[in-house]
Image: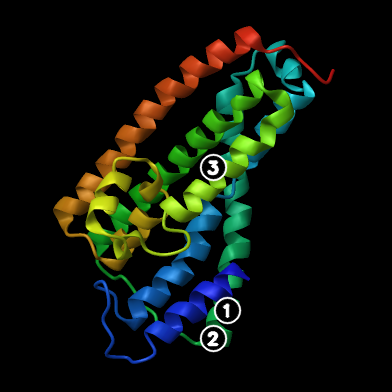
Amino acid sequence: MQFFLIFFLWDTVFSSPSTQIFGYDRPKILTYVFGLIIVRSIVLSARSVDIAGEVSRGDLSNYLVKPINYIKYWLTRDLSSKLLNLSFAMFEAVLLFIVLKPPFFLQTEALQLTFFVFSIFTAILLFFLLMFLFSMFALWYPDQAWGASFLLFIFVDFLGGGVFPLDVLPVNFQNILYLTPFPYLLFSPLQIYLGKFDTLLTVRNVLIGAIWVAILSVMVNKIWRLGLKVYRSEGR
């Protein structure tokens, strides 16, 4: 339902082929909307949404008595589930494309496509770390485990470009957003694919995403160790 609302909104705004708003023409804005289906399926389809539930039920104890790195275990599960989700998303996107017949922007430059792949990989790691970080709230407050994860999805949708492209916002607000990890999940990869960033800005966005991965990796490991000290294995 959300897809159709967004699609028909922008389809109406760009009903004239000559319309150009915020640097988008009709093919690029509708490619952005369709691209969200694919990028969401790769980046936001995460088995790690179950972490908070495992912690609140006390199932985490089963892993702590085994020689398993819990963080790497969930990262592996996340990555393995994405291929299946991607296949379903591709089928959905192709079906919708056949039905709606929108104009489509096809990126053919090898350098842009290479940076796009790098940005997607960075976004996958970034979202996993954010999800793990928010899920660790359950180590302190197991009865409110799902609240933090739900809040993360709201942040990602509105601050990551999942509802509208972030470059339609005031420049000052954009500059603040770019200091957070959220634009590098959905918005930045799609901008790179659409060729809306020049080479310097593309490299900068990929590097900032990678820096956030490094920062969140340190945060997750430190908070994980602190959380284990207060973990009470409730529910078991």
Residue 169 position within the rendered picture, expressed as x and y whole percent measured from the top left: 31, 61
Which badge, 1 or 3, comes first in the chain's sequence? 1
Q: CA distance from mark 2 to mark 1?
A: 6 Å
Q: Amino acid at mark 1?
A: Leu
Say which element carries label 3: helix
Can residue 103 be seen in the rendering of this structure? no
Can residue 209 be seen in the rendering of this structure? yes
Q: Please give the name of the residue rendered at 41% of the width and 21% of the height, measured from the top-left corner.
A: 218
Q: Is residue 186 left or right of residue 89?
A: left
Q: Please give the name of the residue rendered at 60% of the width and 61% of the height, measured from the top-left corner.
A: 87
Q: Are marks 2 and 1 in contact (CB under 8 Å)?
A: yes
> Which dot marks residue 100?
2
Quadrant for the C terminus, please: top right
Residue wearing tag 1: 96
Q: Amino acid at mark 3?
A: Leu
Q: Please give the name of the residue rendered at 46% of the width and 55% of the height, measured from the top-left corner.
A: 158
The image shows residue 128, relative to residue 116, as above or below, that is above
Q: Is residue 170 left or right of residue 134?
A: left
Say which element carries label 1: helix
Residue wearing tag 3: 152
Q: Amino acid at mark 2?
A: Leu
